[in-house]
Amino acid sequence: MIFDYLKCSISREEIPRQPDKFSALLEEISGRAAKVISRAAVRRLYAKLGWEFYEIEGFEAADYIEAARTRLMRELEQQQARVVAEKFD
């Protein structure tokens, strides 16, 4: 239901690129409950990625999303490097 309202302002695909906008819209809709909702969404994201979620003092949902994006990029680069190395072995 919340995402139905949000999709008028931000698409699901844009959330990883604009986590601050997503957080602001969520807060506009749900007020103080936004932190609980966004934290649950981030926990679910990390679970889907097979990662353990650790709370970090001072981190907001946007920080966790950025950390996940950075980690994914690093892991993809490492995977690509392994594939290239295997081709030359």
Image (cartoon, helix red, strand yellow):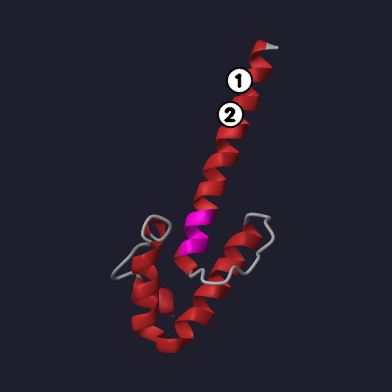
Residue that badge 2 annotates: 80
Which residue: 55% across, 74% down? 39
11 over 82 or under it: above or below: below
The amino acid on which the numbered mark 2 sits, given as a three-letter code, is Gln
In terms of secondary structure, where does tag 1 sit? Answer: helix
Main structural element of the magenta stretch: helix, strand or loop?
Answer: helix
Identify the residue position indicated by label 1 in the image.
84
Question: Where does the C terminus fall, quadrant-wise?
Answer: top right
Asked where in the image residue 80 lies, by quadrant, the reply is top right
- The quadrant of the picture occupied by the N terminus is bottom left
Do tag 1 and tag 2 residues touch (Cβ < 8 Å)?
yes
Q: Determine whether, in the image, residue 69 is placed left or right of residue 88.
A: left
Region in magenta:
63-67
- Asked whether residue 80 is drawn in magenta, I would say no
- Furthest residue to the left? 9
Looking at the image, is 81 positioned above or below residue 64?
above
Residue at 51%, 48% in the rendered image = 70
